[in-house]
Image (cartoon, rainbow, N blue to C red):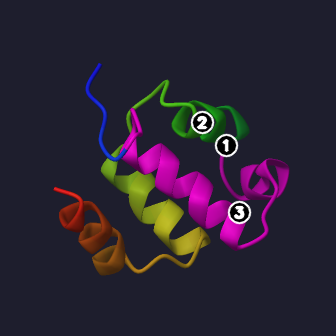
Amino acid sequence: MKKFNDCRNVIGCLVKKYREEKHYTKTQLSNKLDRFELYKIETAKTSVKDFELIGLCIVLDINFEELKKLVEDDL
């Protein structure tokens, strides 16, 4: 499986990073989202749909342009 910046799933790694920076436990973030989906995203067991990415950006207060730049900088 291809890796990007040592992650099998870029979004999963970024969600976990931002979740931890915001001091959310998985349970706290799961209360705002779907718990099982969060687990699958962070462990790279599923792909993130566009509307889920937007929701994650809103809940974790992530600037979408910053997120895009993080990915582009590593290309």
Residue placed farthest to the top in the image? 1
- Where residue 62 sits in the image (x, y, percent)? 48, 76
Element under disc 2 = helix
Residue at the spot of label 1: 34
Q: Label 2 is placed on what type of residue?
A: Glu
Is 17 within the magenta? Answer: yes
**Residue 57 as seen in the image, left or right of residue 75:** right
Q: Amino acid at mark 1?
A: Asp
Q: Which quarter of the rendering shows the C terminus?
A: bottom left
Q: Which residues are magenta?
A: 6-34
Residue to which mark 2 is pinned: 37
Provide the secondary structure element on which disc 1 rests.
loop
Disc 2 crowd rating (10 Å Cα; few below 14, some 14-19, many 20+) is some
Does the residue at mark 2 contact the one at mark 1 (Cβ under 8 Å)?
A: yes
The residue lying at 34 percent from left, 78 percent from top is 66
The numbered mark, 2 or 3, whose residue comes first in the sequence reads: 3
> Does residue 13 lie above or below 19 as drawn?
above
Which residue: 67% across, 43% down? 34
Circle on res. 20: 3
Q: Of marks 3 and 1, which one's residue comes earlier in the chain?
A: 3
Is 39 magenta? The answer is no
- Toward the viewer: 37 or 14? 14
Q: Which residue occupies the foreground of this view, 26 or 14?
A: 14
Q: How many marks?
A: 3
Crowd class of label 1 (few under 14; some 14 to 19; many from 20; radius 10 Å): few
The answer to whether residue 31 is above or below residue 2 is below
- Residue 29 figure quarter: bottom right
Residue drawn at x 31%, y 33% is 3
Structural crowding at the residue carrying mark 3, measured as other residues with C-alpha within 10 Å and reported as few (<14), some (14–19) or many (≥20): few
Q: CA distance from mark 3 to mark 1?
A: 17 Å
